[in-house]
Structure formats: C-alpha cells, structure tokens
Amino acid sequence: MVPMIYSLYGFAIFFFIFWCAMWLIHLVAIFYGKYRLHNKPTAIDSDVPLPGISIIKPLMGVDPNLFTNLETFFTMNYPKYEILFCVEDDTDPAIMLVNSLMEKYPKVDAKLFIGASLVGVNPKINNMNKAYDAASYEFILISDSGIKMKEDTLLDMMRFMSDKTALVHQMPFTCDRDGFAGTLEKIYFGTAQSRIYLTADFIRINCHTGMSALLRKSALDDIGGLQAFGCYLAEDFFMAKAFTDRGWRITICSQPALQNSGICNVNSFQARLTRWAKLRVAMLPLFILVEPLSECMVIGAGASWAVNILFKWDVLGFYLVHILLWFICDWILLSIIQNGSLPFNKFDFVVGWLFRECSGPYLFLLALFDPEIRWRSRIYRLEWGGIAQEIKPRLKL
Ligand SMILES: CCCCCCCC/C=C\CCCCCCCC(=O)N[C@@H](CO[C@@H]1OC[C@@H](O)[C@H](O)[C@H]1O)[C@H](O)/C=C/CCCCCCCCCCCCC
Ligand SMILES: O=c1ccn([C@@H]2O[C@H](COP(=O)(O)OP(=O)(O)O)[C@@H](O)[C@H]2O)c(=O)[nH]1
C-alpha cells in the first residue's frame, strides 16, 4: 500500500513540475519573442562590403502562389546574390515558371539546374546538390519553395551571422491566408511551435527547421557538405547538430519565415505535421513522452489531477483556469510574432485554437502508430536515430 501511495505522489509531483516548466516556457517565449523578433536592422556600415549569398531554391511542382513567392527573390535589397533554382525532373512545370521569371529580371543573376544527383535518400538534398557544388559565394541560403521574402530579409539574416555563427535560420511562420486552414496554420506556427522554437533558441538548444536557413559554406564543407546529410530526412536538424558539436553558434534572425504555399488545406497541413512528428520521434525518442505532455489539454489534465492529490484543489476549476491562461498566453505570443493586425477576428482565433489544441495530441498518436513517411512523391521508413530508407519507388504524381 505504501509504495502505491509513494508512486501516486511521485506521479503527481512529476506532473506538477512539468506543468510549472511549461509556464516557464510560455513566459520565456513571450519575453524573448518581444525582445528578439521584428527589430529593425541597425544602419548597415557601407564601408564593409556585405558578403555574397548563393540562394538555393529546390523546386518540385507548382502551386498557385509559386510565381509570386519566387518573384520576391528577384526584388530583394541585397548587393550581391545569385539564385540557383533546382528541379529534379525535366518535365516539371516549375521550369517554365522559373524561365519566365529569369526573362522578366535579366539583371538578376539566376541559374536553373535540372536533374538530381543521387547522394542519399533525401530528395531535397539530391535536388540541391548540383547547385551547391556550383555556388559562387561564401554563404548559402537554403530556401524552400513555399517561402516568400521581404525586401530586407537577407540583410536581416546576415546581420546575425557573426564570426562564431555558422547558421542563421528563420523561425517558421506563415503569410496571411484566407480560410480556416490559413487561420489554423498561423495559430499553430505562432503558438505551439514558436513557443518551443523561441525557448529552444533562447537556451541554445538545436531546433533548426531548414525551410529558410543561411549557412556558412566553409563550415558546411568542413562537415562534408550537403551530401553528408543525404541519409537523413531531417537534414536540417543533423546539419545544425554537426555545427554545434564543433562549437559553432546557430541562431534565429529577427524575421519569422513567411510560408506562403498556394496549397493550404487542413488535410495537407495535418499530414505535414504528422510527418514532422515522425521525424522528431525517430531522432529524439524522448519526444514520445514530452511532446504529448507539452500539449495544453494533456498537461492541464495531468496537473489538475496532481493538484487535487497534492493540495486538494478542485479539478474542474483548475483545468478551466489553466486552459484560459494558456489561451491568453498564446494570443499574446501570436500577436508578438504577427507584429501587426491579425487576418482573423477573436472568434476565429477561439475556434482555430480549440481545434488545434484538441487535434494536436490525436495527430501525434497517429504519427506514433504509422511508421511510414510519405513526402511528396516518395515513401520512407525511419530507423531510430533518424536514418531514412526509401521503401517504395517514386510515384509519378
Ligand atoms: C519540460 C520540458 C518540456 C519540453 C517540451 C518539448 C516539447 C516539444 C513539443 C513540440 C516540438 C516543436 C518542435 C519545434 C520545431 C520542429 C519542427 C519540425 O519538426 N521540423 C522538422 C521537419 O522540418 C522539415 O524537414 C524537412 C526539410 O527538408 C524541411 O525543409 C524542413 O522544414 C525538422 O526536421 C526538425 C527540426 C528540429 C526538431 C528538434 C526540436 C527540438 C526542440 C527541443 C525543445 C526543447 C525546449 C526547451 C525545453 C526546456
Ligand atoms: O522530393 C522532394 C521533396 C521536397 N523537395 C523540396 O524540399 C522543400 C521542402 O519540401 P516540402 O515543402 O514538401 O517540405 P515540408 O516543409 O513540408 O517538410 C521544397 O522546396 C521542395 O521543393 C524536393 O526538392 N524534392
């Protein structure tokens, strides 16, 4: 009987401490986000020339926003850069679109590479490898197809690239997009994900998501170049880990990444989150426990039970206050990251937030019980540690 009481109290203390840690994460994210994001660049010293940047854009297929997203790369305010578009398949419709942009902006240094080099299983790495080998400058920007840039985004990223830094990344966020899926994506990236992302950056834990990342090429060459990470699907995480293992700094810049894919629906968004959860669990198995526990509804339930055991507090009252406070913190954080008016009203936020918070744990369970990873036209399976194997030949979409 006594061991059972001890275990009961042990669990209650564990939930209570975890719950306190989550509130600390909320506070760190809010204060660090306010301090770190959206601060205007100090005047650039015009006597020191800015280093050149080779922008690598891996493309696969087109979507309704691709043209306007890519166009933002031709109109950036940065003195020296080249754009290296990569397409794996010579029948890809993205080729036509890139050619028309290159014709529209003949003064911008842009090239198109067709055909992947098979250096591993990661199709994004295979697609980018030729461009990486041909890059002229000492810094590389890897930028996914759905990213939209502001005129000064490159300047913003470069000003965080100190001598000790090998990687400056943009925290994932989204452009304003219509419809429930657009609201949901903004809420997820501006609350649940950014809370962890900002805290991790603050305490210097690797949380690099490689959708928009400025890399020091010499440092990447020292760890084997892009191709050294072709065996992983989460090449971004392992690349950043290799840098930090060698003593390099990695950091976010002040502008969050503006994801603006023209494909915006709840199913594809949830499939993407599930794919990412599978990657995280394979890389860091501790996530099987901590990720669901970090969800509002789950830790709230655990903490409500814990405070009832420890302090005899009312379970339902505690749970409702917990949800209300979590909701308010999320609203504050989202407003800081948006840095302007949100494209939806408070009612839409309530609905989107409740949907996200209730579906998050369910999506995580789905990810745990389905080991196959579908990424664009390919299907993979991951080993513990993150090494990937392609298990079905490429589908023609
Ligand atoms: C009391 C302790 C509580 C700890 C709670 C931790 C709970 C974690 C909960 C949520 C995790 C959010 C993680 C943030 C970002 C992850 C996004 C992601 O999964 N990205 C992966 C996929 O990216 C794409 O991959 C393909 C590539 O080609 C594309 O270009 C990419 O965009 C990516 O691979 C993984 C990146 C890093 C994941 C590691 C995150 C570690 C976070 C540690 C958190 C510690 C917080 C601080 C605790 C005190
Ligand atoms: O087989 C593939 C899959 C993806 N990509 C590129 O990798 C980047 C990230 O792809 P996606 O947006 O599907 O990844 P997510 O952000 O959803 O993980 C994009 O620029 C894609 O064009 C690629 O070149 N080949």
Image: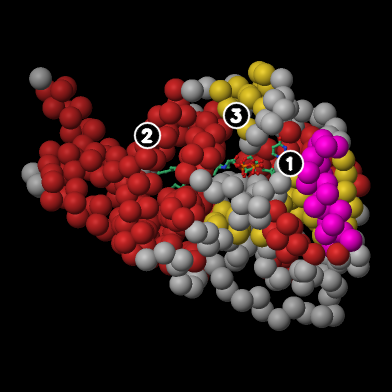
Q: Which residue is mark 2?
A: 362
In the picture, the quarter occupied by the C terminus is top right
Residue type, numbered disc 3: Arg
Left or right of 158 in this view: 349 = left
In the picture, the quarter occupied by the N terminus is top left
Q: Tag 2 or tag 3, which sits nearer the N-term?
A: 2
Q: Is residue 378 visible?
A: yes
Please give the name of the residue rendered at 70% of the width and 49% of the height, measured from the top-left corner.
145
**Callout 1 environment at 10 Å: few (<14), some (14 to 19), or many (20+)?**
many
Q: Which residue is mark 1?
A: 60
Q: Name the mark nearer the viewer: 1 or 2.
A: 1
Q: Position of residue 338 (x, y in %)?
A: 49, 66
The Cα–Cα distance between marks 3 and 1, rounded to whole angstroms, is 15 Å
Please give the name of the residue rendered at 18% of the width and 43% of the height, measured from the top-left corner.
304
The Cα–Cα distance between marks 1 and 2, rounded to whole angstroms, is 30 Å
Q: Position of residue 263 (x, y in %)?
A: 59, 47
Q: Position of residue 274 (x, y in %)?
A: 50, 35
87 falls in the magenta region: yes
